[in-house]
Amino acid sequence: GAGVSQSPSNKVTEKGKDVELRCDPISGHTALYWYRQRLGQGLEFLIYFQGNSAPDKSGLPSDRFSAERTGESVSTLTIQRTQQEDSAVYLCASSARSGQGTGELFFGEGSRLTVL
Amino acid sequence: GESVGLHLPTLSVQEGDNSIINCAYSNSASDYFIWYKQESGKGPQFIIDIRSNMDKRQGQRVTVLLNKTVKHLSLQIAATQPGDSAVYFCAENGGSSYKLIFGSGTRLLVRP
C-alpha cells in the first residue's frame, strides 16, 4: 500500500487476555518501529527492527510484551495477559533509512487498545 | 531517562497570525531533531527536521530554529490556518542513529 497500515484500528479486550497488533510497513522500508501513546501524552518508544532483527527492545515495558517481524515486512506486537495500564494507542512507523541517521518516520494511524 | 519537554501544553492563535511552538531538549548528544503534527485519530505526520550543524531551516510556511547553547527548539508557522489545528511534537535522537525520543506535545488551536 501507499502508507503504513495497522490492524485492528480498535481493540477492546478483557483483562488477562492476549492481543496481537499488526503492522504492514511501506514496501521496501527496512526500519520498523513500535511506539505507545497513552491518552494526552507523547510517544513512548517500544522496539526497533532493522530488517527482521530487533537490535533495540529496550522500550518494551515488561516480558508480557513481544514483537516479531518476518520477511522484512509485516510486524506483530503481542501483549500477553493484558492489564488496564496497557490501554493506549500503539503506533507503528517505518523508515527507508538504515543506520544513516534517523530520517523521517512514516506512521500508521495506530491501533487503539482498551483493556476492560 | 532522557526526555524532551514542551513549555506550552496548549497554544491558541487567531487565524492568519504566526504561531511559535517551543521545545526544550535535555540530551546534549542529540544531533537530529524533528517536528511532527498529529491530528485527532491519526498518526503523527512529518513537518520538518533539522540537524545540529544548522541553526535554522525553512519549509513551506514553517521554520525550525535550533539553539544548541540553551538546548531549545522552536517551530514557527506563518499565517496559521484552521487546518494547522493539531498536536505538535518535537523529537530528538539522543545521539542515536535510529531512535527518536518524543516530547509530550503542544496542542495548537486556531481561532477563526
Image: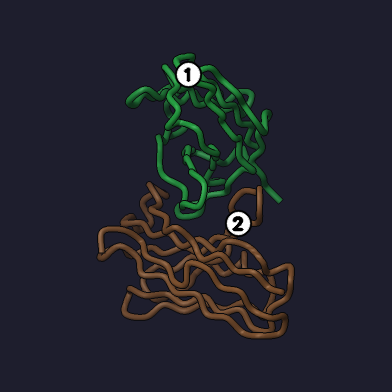
**Front residue of B82 and A78:** B82
**Front residue of A38 and B85:** B85
**Front residue of B39 and B26:** B39
Q: Residue A105, image x and y in percent?
A: 40, 52
Chain assignment, label 1? B
Q: Quadrant of residue B20?
A: top right
Mark on residue A37?
2
Q: Residue A85, image x and y in percent?
A: 73, 67
Give the letter of the green chain.
B
Residue occupying the point 41% across, 36% down: B49
Numbered disc in front, either 2 or 1: 1
Mark 2, Cα crowd under 10 Å, few <14 / some 14-19 / many 20+, is some
Amino acid at the residue labelled 1: Glu
Q: Residue B14, image x and y in percent?
A: 53, 17
Q: Is residue A57 above or below residue B79?
A: below
Q: Colour of chain A?
A: brown
Mark on residue B15?
1
Residue occupying the point 64% across, 78% down: A13
Mark on residue A58?
none
Q: Quadrant of residue B12?
A: top right
Q: Is residue B93 above or below residue B21?
A: below
Q: Secondary structure at mark 2?
A: strand
Mark pair 2, 1: CA separation? 29 Å
Chain assignment, label 2? A
- Which residue is the extreme one toward the front? B112
Q: Residue B60, image x and y in percent?
A: 32, 25
- Taking the image as shown, residue B98 lies to the left or right of residue A73, namely right
User: Do residues under tags 2 and 1 come within 8 Å of each other at their CB atoms?
Assistant: no
- Taking the image as shown, residue A26 lies to the left or right of residue A65, namely left
